[in-house]
Image (cartoon, rainbow, N blue to C red):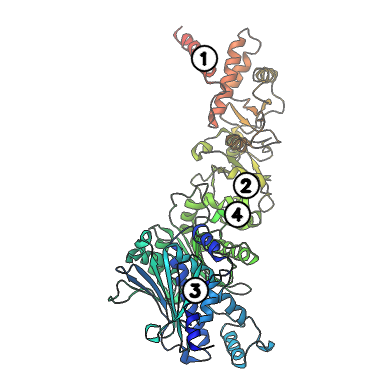
Amino acid sequence: MSEAAGQSQSFQAQPFQADVARLLHLMVHSIYSDRDIFLRELLSNAADACEKLRYEALADPALAKQPFNITIGVDKDAGTLAIEDNGVGMTREDLADSLGTIARSGTRAFLDRLGARPESGELSPQEAEDVRETELESKGGAHVDLIGQFGIGFYSAFMVADRVEVFSRRAGSDEAFVWSSDGKGSFTITPLDLDHAPEHGTRVVLHLTEASKDYLDAHKIEGIVREHSSALAAPIELVESPDAEPRRLSDGQALWTKPKSAITPEEYADFYHTLAGQFDAPALTVHWRAEGRHEYTVLAFVPSSRPFDLFNPERHGRARLYVRHVLITDDADVLPRWLRFVRLVVDSADLPLNVSREMIQESPVFGAIKKGVANKILHELTKLAENDSAKFDDVWKHFGVVLKEGLYEEPEKRDALFALARFASSSHPEGGRTLKDYIAGLKENQTAIYYLLGDDLKRLAASPQLEGFAARGVEVLLLPDPIDAFWVSTAVGYEGKPFKSVTQGAADIASIPLLDAAAGEAPEAQPPAGLAALFALMKQTLEDSVAEVRASDRLAQSPACLIAPDRGPDRRLEQLLAEHGQLGAATKPILEINPKHPLIQALASLVGSPDRQKIEDITWLIFDEARLMEGEKPANAPEFATRLTRILLEAAERSSA
């Protein structure tokens, strides 16, 4: 072919492959949800190019004569934004292949080439030696910091530009070319005078649309770089006008990639403030690198105060996910919900990504990372509890209710979470009790870990159901959080002792000795005849509201209390299920009566008298009082008021007589 013919072909417009006009429209208007992503993609591609040249320079150091660098250039007069790197650059064929075919990725092809084994004969002798050297450097595996899919992410530029030009020169080549397109169906590749070409590398020039001129603002660019690309492995500089001096935006090394010994507590705190959007000091900082089958780096923080949206139903664990130092998402599903208060960064080298890199694909690798992160954070919380109980108690005060969700959601983590859990109890209403402490304080003949569910700690501490346990010195865990009703219903027990509600079924504490035997004897097995008749009358009166009326050994000062039957849900769990519309027919409670209470004995003396109305009024008032003690409303408020008025009026008339 003659030189003239070759020049003619150089300027000829070429159509995109793979029906690119339609695909490009979908890429620009459907796949990416945030226009800022275009800058992330172009900076990622520039970092790729630098990493490729770094690798090639192992065999030929003359290819890279200066430190790698990425420059963002702003020209407000021309309305252009340029991203330039001094990486490997592209030949004419590279430009046509990588930028002319949506589904092609120069980076992926390069990785595939590296994947060829030296002994297979697919590589030249020098290339094979290069791979061997890299394997030695990376402890047995060819590890090159490469990211992205160039032929896909590049097209996000057309979200903000109506024309894109790519000036590129391959390292070691004496030819340069410019690729140009308006993104509507075709592109051109033309020779570029070396005087106007990079020494090696690529310059992408975006001719911004009128609606996208805000991307010429230096503050906006700096914010995007800080959020999405500050962790790239090449420094990024900003030139705010054609005659301005470069200003460094990132140093090419993310905080979590640095050795822990090189990071000060102040640097950790500053990064936490940026990551979490909070200004408290982190209660716990965990920084580690996982090595082995999967390699990834994690920098995690436990806040020292509650985020305002901690209990938002839509809230999940906020983890920033990077792949080879490029931000993929700031809301990755890395953490289980019961660790959603932790703020962290995860940086992996081998996660599979989907086409836009805004969402990662579920994979065994990602699953292993999620499991490893949760286990590590749980381990570090356990160490904190063992080594600094005061600081951990503060963590538990803020996030214990969230951690307890793990007791229900992940039974396999239950033992580890039980070791962390702190509880308020009848003997320690201020909290801080561990299950280990509880077991150490078991009383003679005590065979269970007793607990009381509710929605208010003060009300629980004053509950009449505790009286019989207090008389025997038996500690009862006070559980005021909604999640408590669920995990205790599924937990088998702790150290061989089952969990048992003090408001469900028989108390089963008669065999536990009273602290003061002189203070009273156990209730008689059979109540006196008058009491038996009273219980029968009370059951008849409350027939539609209670399943049974019986004597209680869990009461000491109060006249009555309500408990749940042996079978079925605890009363608090039933209440929660009803509030969420997940309860069918409610079970009737059991009314337990203290046969030694003066009110009950006085009421028993009225059995057989003609004043049946008074007995029924007092019976209903006793029942409603038991409901009130549990934070419930009277069964029928108007009738409650009427009965109470009748009783009070009679008492007042008797006093005035």
Mark 1 or mark 3, whichever is nearer to me = 3
* Residue wearing tag 4: 418
Q: Could you tell me which secondary element the residue under label 4 belongs to?
A: helix
C-alpha gap between disc 4 and disc 1: 49 Å
> Which x, y percent locates residue 545?
64, 23
Residue 618 sits in which quadrant?
top right
Tell which circle, 3 or 4, labels the residue nearer the N-terminal end.
Answer: 3
C-alpha gap between disc 2 and disc 4: 11 Å
* The N terminus, quarter of image: bottom right
Q: Could you tell me which secondary element the residue under label 2 belongs to?
A: helix
> Which x, y percent locates residue 515?
60, 40
Amino acid beneath label 4: Phe
Amino acid beneath label 2: Trp
* Residue wearing tag 3: 13
Seen at 66% across and 85% down, the residue is 117
Tell which circle, 1 or 2, labels the residue nearer the N-terminal end.
Answer: 2
Res. 334 mark: none
> Which x, y percent locates residue 231?
45, 71
User: Would residue 159 be seen by someone viewing this image from the given angle?
Assistant: yes
Q: Where is 23 relative to 424, above or below? A: below
Res. 642 mark: 1
Tell which circle, 2 or 4, labels the residue nearer the N-terminal end.
Answer: 4
Res. 487 mark: 2
Q: Between residue 137 and residue 500, name the one nearer to us.
A: 137
C-alpha gap between disc 1 and disc 3: 93 Å
Q: Between residue 626 and residue 94, name the one nearer to us.
A: 94
Mark 2 or mark 3, whichever is nearer to me = 3
Residue 266 sits in which quadrant?
bottom left
Amino acid beneath label 3: Ala
User: Would you call the spot at circle 3 few (<14 residues within 10 Å), some (14-19), or many (20 or more)?
Assistant: some
C-alpha gap between disc 1 and disc 2: 41 Å
Is label 2 in contact with label 4 (beta carbons under 8 Å)? no
